Image (cartoon, rainbow, N blue to C red):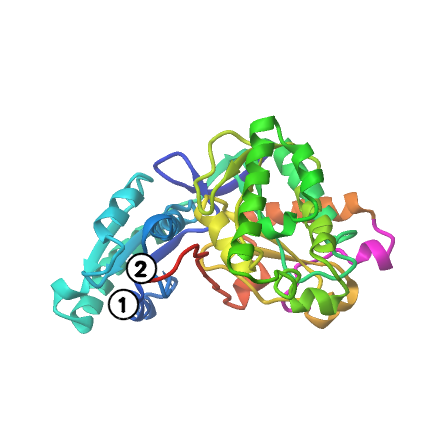
Amino acid sequence: MKIKGYKRDNGKYGIRNHLLILPVSVCASETAVRISQLIPGSIALPHQHGCCHVGEDYKQVLRTLVGFAKNPNVGAVLIVALGCEGINPEEVKREIEKSAKPVEQIIIQRKGGTAKTIKEGEIICRRMMEKLLHQKKEEFDISKITLALECGGSDPASGITANPSVGVASDLLIKHGGSSILSETTELIGADNIIVKRAYNKRIAQKILFMIERIEKRAIDMHVDLRGTQPTPGNIEGGLTTIEEKSLGCIHKAGNSSIIGVLEYAEQIPDKKGLYFMDTPGQDIESITGMLAGGAQIVVFTTGRGTPTGSPIAPVIKISSNTMLYKNMSEHIDVNAGEIINKGKTIEEIGQKIFNEIIKVCNGKMTKSEILGHKEFAIYRIGYTF
C-alpha cells in the first residue's frame, strides 16, 4: 500500500516536514522559543532539562532530545545551547547528524547574549525553512510507518471499544509490513501473565517482566502506593477501581500480533518490522515523547475521559470510547469508537475506520489536535537533578 511523504537521506520517510528548534537545556529554551516566533511553521521545544543530570538519567535525557530531532517527521534542526550546560551540544549535533538531516547549532554565550543569538538563529532558520518548503512529497510504502499506541484516562468502555479497535488497526498496519509500539509499563501490571504470552521468545518475555518489576520496585523504594496515581483519579472517576482493570483494557491496543522486541525509553526502533514494547510511564505526554523519540511518525490515542493532548512533531489521532464523550469533546476527537455500543458497529469495522484514518493523516489530513495547535512535550526522568 502506497502513501506520500518526505524522503530523508537515511532512507526513512516523514509524514510531516518540521523545522525543529531544539534547546539542549532550560537555559536556552526561551531563546529557542523567540527564534521560532520569527519563523512561521517552525517548532520550538522548550523544556526544563539539560543540566545537572547524572548516570542513566543523563543518558535518557540525551537519548530523548536526540531521538526527537532524528524523528523522520523533522526535516531540519537548529540546536540552541547556552554554552555551559550538562548536555553537550556538540554531542547532540553529532548524534543527530547520523540521521543525515541538516543540523546546525548556535551557542548563546559565544554570540554575546540573547538578542544576537536570536538574530543569527533567524537567519539560519529562514535558510533551512526555504529548503523544506521546496521539498516535494514522494510515494512510499506504508511499511515505512511506525505507529505509537497510547491510551489516556479510561472508562469501563475503553477496554471493549476504543482499545480493541486500535488493536485491529495496529494488526492491519503490521500485516502491511509496518510497526507499532505498545507502551505504558505501569499499565501492564496485573496483565503481565497475559502479555508475556505474546512475546516472540523467552528472552523478550523475561525482559518485559523485568521492566514491570523494575517500575514496581521504584515505587517500593520510595515507600509509596501506586494507587491514586495508577489508576489515576480520572480513571477512578471514570469507573475503574484497580490498575489490573486499567491494564486489561490497555493491552488490547496491541491487537493480536507477537511482540518481537523490547525497547528502553526513547530507544530507536530497529529496522525489523512488527510489534514492539517500550518502557514508558503511564503519564501520556512522557509516554508519547518516548515513542516519537524512538522513531514513530504517528500516534493513535484512546480516551474514555477526553484530553486535548497533541505533539510538537507528530499527528495524534484521538479515539473516544463512548459517544457521550465524542459529542461533549467533538473538537478533540477524530474517531468515535462508541458506535460499537450505540450503533452496533463491530470492533473490526471501527478498527478498519481507524486504519483508514491513519492512511488519510499520513497523506496530509490534519488531526484535530494539530488544528488546535497542541504541542505537548515532556521527558520521562528516572533520577534526581543535582
Kind of residue at disc 1: Cys
Query: Along the horizontal axis of the image, is 4 left or right of 113?
Result: right
Categorize mark 1 by other alpha carbons within 10 Å: few (<14), some (14-19), many (20+). many
Classify the position of the N terminus by image quarter.
top right
**What residue did someone put label 1 on?**
27
**What residue did someone put label 2 on?**
50
Image marks 2 and 1: residues in contact by CB distance under 8 Å: yes
Q: State the CA–CA distance, disc 2 to disc 1.
A: 8 Å
* 239 and 164: which is toward the camera: 239
Estimate the x, y position of residue 194 in percent, counting from the top left. Answer: 71, 39
Q: Relative to residue 70, is residue 259 depicted above or below?
A: above
Estimate the x, y position of residue 120 in percent, counting from the top left. Answer: 18, 64
Q: Relative to residue 256, is residue 378 depicted above or below?
A: below
Q: Relative to residue 99, is residue 374 depicted above or below?
A: below
Task: Say whether residue 184 is visible.
Answer: no
Taking the magenta stretch, the answer to whether it contains residue 75 is no
Query: Secondary structure under badge 2?
Result: loop
Estimate the x, y position of residue 128 in percent, counting from the top left. Answer: 28, 54
